[in-house]
Image: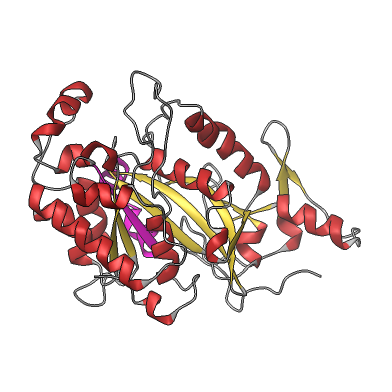
């Protein structure tokens, strides 16, 4: 039996206009990625029908034909969608962090928290794993987010937790894209949660980071992340604070592990159960560390968002040399910010976690 449709039509994550599910307008992609009409009018076998729908798409009718918005059928039929945006300037490590997250999810990293994940579209998910997650696990440096007209869709999941299923789509936003795109405000209105990726090489005045800065060409600055400021300045608000939940991920934390407060968190795994006390403790430590060694401007997401947690994470756990990580990759605590925003979005049990934030 087909799943019941949402009570309200979901919004296209690109243009935020409603899209009504229409089984007469479905298509699949052939081996050349060309759309091919899908006709299920004569398919009465439930399992075959379900499998075909898992592979199918529907075009957003509001998009320009030259730049179509392709929506997987489960996005339109499986509960209220959640859009998660990864925000940060180039070289902050957003692409590596999201790939590390997906790698942990692929290995069952969310199951201890009662969350089951399926690909939103199996073929797109296989491509993302093949082009991003597997190369990272082989120790390859991933390309930076390219200049695109709009936000770059990365991957999508069907996440089920405690009887609730939601499509979750991830977008990788580069700061340059946001600053130059006139449609960004409309897109940001539909984002359900933000993960701000903070680069310690740019944010922290620590002299121990100078050799890495010299090698990578990155420069420390006190004015904060331009991508953070652009996003936070363009999200519509009904009051002084942004209502969408947010998490700040201090990426590349392995570079500052010499500090006891950082090492204390990186040396421990994720807790067996997410609790508000631990989230607040880590958030306090990250806030104090960044504020002590950098400027308040780097903590703007915390200042502007009503619910925000902060986390020490390491997407790769090592430094790149050319096109590789010669010592391999060792992700640390990469699921912490995602679990936090899932909790604030109601995907994890516990009413108090919905109000998590410090």
Residue at image point 72% right, 54% down: 54
Q: Which quarter of the figure is the C terminus placed in?
A: bottom left
- Viewer-closest of 27 and 314: 314
- Residue 111 drawn at (x, y percent): 57, 59
Residue 147 in which image quadrant: top left
Left or right: 133, with 283 as reference point = right
Residue 33 in which image quadrant: top right
In this picture, which residue range is highlighted in magenta?
176-199
- Residue 323 drawn at (x, y percent): 39, 20
- Viewer-closest of 216 and 173: 216
**Residue 62 magenta-drawn?**
no
Q: Is residue 131 above or below residue 177?
A: above
- Residue 89 drawn at (x, y percent): 26, 41
Q: Which quarter of the figure is the N terminus placed in?
A: bottom right
Whether residue 42 appears in this view of the structure is yes
Residue 21 in which image quadrant: bottom right
Toward the top, the furthest residue is 322
Left or right: 34, with 303 as reference point = right
């Amino acid at each position: 039996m087909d799943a019941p449709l949402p009570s309200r039509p979901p919004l296209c994550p690109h243009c935020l206009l409603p899209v009504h599910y229409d089984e007469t307008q479905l298509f699949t992609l052939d081996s050349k990625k060309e759309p091919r009409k899908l006709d299920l009018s004569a398919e009465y076998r439930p399992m075959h029908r379900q499998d075909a729908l898992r592979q199918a798409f529907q075009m957003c009718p509001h998009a320009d034909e030259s730049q179509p918005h392709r929506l997987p059928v489960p996005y339109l039929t499986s509960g209220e969608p959640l859009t998660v945006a990864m925000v940060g300037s180039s070289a902050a490590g957003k692409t590596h962090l999201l790939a590390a997250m997906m790698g942990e999810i692929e290995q069952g990293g969310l199951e201890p928290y009662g969350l089951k994940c399926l690909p939103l579209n199996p073929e797109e998910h296989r491509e993302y794993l093949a082009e991003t997650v597997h190369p990272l696990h082989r120790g390859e440096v991933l390309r930076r987010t390219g200049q695109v007209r709009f936000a770059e869709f990365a991957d999508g999941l069907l996440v089920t937790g405690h009887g609730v299923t939601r499509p979750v789509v991830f977008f990788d936003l580069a700061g340059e894209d946001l600053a130059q795109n006139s449609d960004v405000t409309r897109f940001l209105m539909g984002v359900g949660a933000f993960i701000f990726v903070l680069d310690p090489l740019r944010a922290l005045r620590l002299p121990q980071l100078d050799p890495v800065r010299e090698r990578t060409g990155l420069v420390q600055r006190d004015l904060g992340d331009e991508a953070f400021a652009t996003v936070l300045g363009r999200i519509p608000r009904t009051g002084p604070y942004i209502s969408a939940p947010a998490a700040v991920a201090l990426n590349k934390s392995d570079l500052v592990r010499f500090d006891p407060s950082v090492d204390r968190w990186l040396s421990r795994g994720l807790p067996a159960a997410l609790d508000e006390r631990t989230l607040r403790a880590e958030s306090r430590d990250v806030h104090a560390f960044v504020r002590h060694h950098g400027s308040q401007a780097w903590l703007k997401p915390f200042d502007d968002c009503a619910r925000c947690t902060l986390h020490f994470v390491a997407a790769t756990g090592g430094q790149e040399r050319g096109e590789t990580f010669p010592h391999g990759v060792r992700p640390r605590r990469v699921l912490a910010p995602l679990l936090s925003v899932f909790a604030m979005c109601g995907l994890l049990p516990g009413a108090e976690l919905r109000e998590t934030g410090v």
